[in-house]
Image (cartoon, rainbow, N blue to C red):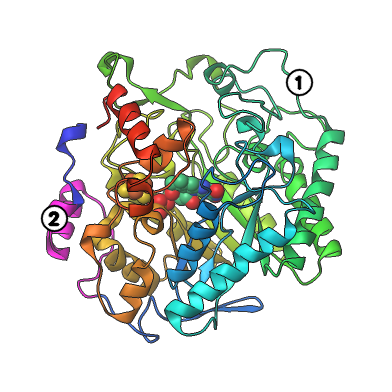
């Protein structure tokens, strides 16, 4: 099947049409015909998670906007986004957005950063969110809010929107080439890592003082935490065996528990990865991206540069190590797990199933519903092995009209505990509240996975839903984005 052949979700009209399409694709995705509302419905039911009772099954994924001030304080755009997270009615706010624990680890010069000076502004993001949530839902009972802590590792751009300043743990034969990391680029030393752990602990304590109930120790999407998990070729305390590769997480956990005893810990993890993908050169034109194909890995076998990646066939997931990882996480007494896949930098179709590629991506190599199914099935598989962990899933936005139908079915059938929403909430923040109240969805506001929220920041602009959110649609950046998309033949 090729790009143009994928049925548009909008055209499927009804759950029956959607299910017929699933059947054509051979995807065993559960989908309910009727979606319930209220606290007795599957999505409205509360969930017990350690010390928390989470008031419903909708959750908001962390999403940054490349829109803070250069000192790492939130701007009006940042505050607006957090307010929208509160208006959503979702009772789990997983992390808000990636917050750098120090300057050199920022993914862009406008990333939120947890410093002493910024602490009160980051506390206000939480209070803004809580106030908006009360406005939408009447109270804040069962609302749980965490903060995602990060160091961007290989993808740091702390000082300029266009200049990568990578901090790497090991040499990656494909990513080093793809992102221009020089052969003599220094690796972070074990001493550097220990100093970074101290910075995480300080940031976590600040998050606790701000009123956040948990911190997410981000281990996903190719950033530093994730890179530890694949540091199989790294010598020393933090590489090689899985025990060493999880030392960062274990030391973070013990340090944070000592510094902020009441603070819970969660982990968002790219539980499986594949080799980097690129636009097929055979099918790319100078102004048009081809469909994604795996980068050449023939010289890199066995492939010892992935986590949850089959070493002999790295275009295939292997959950052996991810299961061992979850066993370690469970042994640490961490219960909150947010499962995601791959990286938006080098295999975005895994992370964010989408019909339209961002400017640095490629056309979908598969029907994006296959990508959604990969997320659902991976979580189902792991949930059945670790019933005591609380699993939040990702990648639901592409379901569009049928998001609530599938979400209800997977929660009802026990595949997942919390349904994480990413892009959909940028386009249509109130979707969870509309579904839970029985008002029904506003179809015109549904995210159609145009990827502008990624194309914009990749080209130096703030992120946001340019096609559907009037705040961005009417902004001066819209004209620039239109030009960028025209030049890349994406409009
Ligand atoms: C604009 C944008 C910003 C994002 N920022 C983050 C982030 O800060 N931390 C993170 O873990 N994931 C981030 N993500 C990934 C999302 O949390 C989510 O995993 C992804 O969009 C897939 O979910 P969806 O299909 O509901 O959009 C971001 C995604 C988008 C589109
Ligand atoms: S820009 Fe809007 S419609 Fe496009 S993917 Fe992002 S949230 Fe969805």
In the image, the residue with mark 1 has its CB under 8 Å from the nearest atom of ligand 1: no
Residue depicted at 30% across the width and 13% down the height: 286
What is the magenta range?
10-34
Of pointers 1 and 2, the one earlier in the residue sequence: 2
Residue depicted at 42% across the width and 36% down the height: 456
**In this picture, is 307 found above or below 41?**
above
The question of residue 264 being in magenta is answered with no
**In this picture, is 298 found above or below 96?**
above
Question: Considering the numbered disc 2 on the image, is that residue within a helix, a strand or a loop?
Answer: helix
In the image, the residue with mark 2 has its CB under 8 Å from the nearest atom of ligand 1: no
Q: Residues within 10 Å of mark 1 (few under 14, many from 20)?
A: some
Q: Where is residue 263 in the image (x, y as percent from the top left)?
A: 74, 68
For the residues labelled 1 and 2, the Cα–Cα distance comes to 52 Å
Indicate left or right for 35 with 19 as reference.
right
Q: Position of residue 331 (x, y in %)?
A: 71, 62
What label does residue 186 carry, if any? 1
- Quarter of the image with the C terminus in it: top left
Report the front residue among 394 and 308. 394
Report the front residue among 179 and 303. 179
- Residue 395 visible (yes or no): no
Residue depicted at 32% across the width and 73% down the height: 434
Q: Position of residue 249 (x, y in %)?
A: 73, 50
Report the front residue among 258 and 317. 258
Residue depicted at 54% across the width and 75% down the height: 131
Q: Name the residue under label 2.
A: 12
């Amino acid at each position: 099947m090729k790009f143009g052949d994928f049925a548009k979700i909008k055209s499927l009209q009804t759950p029956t049409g959607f299910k017929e399409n699933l059947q054509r694709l051979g995807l065993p995705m559960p989908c309910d015909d009727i979606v319930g509302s209220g606290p007795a419905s599957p999505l409205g039911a509360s969930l017990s998670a350690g010390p928390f009772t989470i008031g419903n099954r909708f959750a908001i994924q962390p999403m940054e906007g490349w829109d803070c001030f250069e000192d790492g304080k939130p701007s009006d755009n940042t505050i607006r986004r957090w307010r929208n997270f509160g208006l959503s009615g979702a009772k789990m706010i997983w992390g808000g957005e990636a917050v750098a624990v120090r300057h050199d680890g920022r993914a862009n010069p406008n990333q939120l950063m947890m410093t002493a000076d910024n602490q009160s502004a980051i506390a206000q993001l939480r209070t803004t969110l809580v106030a908006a949530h009360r406005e939408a839902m009447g109270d804040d009972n069962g609302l749980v809010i965490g903060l995602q802590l990060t160091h961007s590792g290989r993808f740091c751009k702390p000082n300029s929107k266009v200049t990568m300043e990578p901090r790497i743990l090991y040499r990656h034969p494909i990513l080093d080439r793809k992102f221009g990391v020089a052969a003599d680029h220094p690796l972070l030393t074990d001493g550097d890592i220990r100093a970074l752990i101290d910075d995480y602990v300080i940031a976590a304590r600040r998050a606790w003082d701000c009123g956040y109930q948990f911190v997410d120790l981000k281990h996903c999407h190719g950033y530093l935490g994730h890179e530890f998990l694949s540091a199989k070729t790294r010598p020393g305390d933090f590489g090689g065996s899985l025990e060493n590769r999880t030392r960062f997480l274990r030391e973070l956990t013990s340090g944070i528990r000592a510094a902020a005893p009441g603070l819970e810990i969660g982990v968002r993890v790219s539980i499986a990865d594949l080799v980097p993908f690129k636009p097929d050169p055979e099918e790319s034109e100078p102004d048009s991206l081809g469909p994604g194909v795996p980068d050449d890995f023939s010289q890199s076998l066995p492939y010892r540069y992935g986590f949850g990646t089959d070493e002999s066939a790295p275009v295939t997931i292997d959950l052996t190590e991810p299961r061992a990882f979850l066993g370690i996480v469970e042994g640490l007494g961490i219960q909150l797990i947010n499962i995601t896949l791959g990286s938006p930098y080098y295999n975005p179709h895994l992370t964010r199933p989408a019909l339209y590629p961002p400017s640095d991506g490629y056309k979908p190599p598969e029907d994006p519903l296959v990508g959604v199914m990969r997320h659902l099935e991976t979580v189902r598989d792991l949930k059945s092995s670790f019933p005591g962990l609380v699993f939040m899933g990702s990648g639901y936005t592409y379901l569009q009209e049928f998001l609530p139908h599938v979400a209800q079915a997977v929660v009802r059938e026990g595949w997942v505990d919390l349904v994480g929403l990413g892009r959909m909430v940028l386009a249509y923040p109130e979707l969870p509240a509309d579904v839970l109240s029985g008002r029904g969805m506003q179809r015109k506001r549904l995210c159609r996975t145009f990827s502008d929220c990624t194309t914009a920041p990749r080209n130096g602009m703030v992120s946001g839903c340019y096609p559907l959110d009037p705040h961005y649609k009417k902004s001066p950046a819209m004209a620039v984005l239109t030009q960028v998309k025209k030049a890349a033949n994406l409009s």
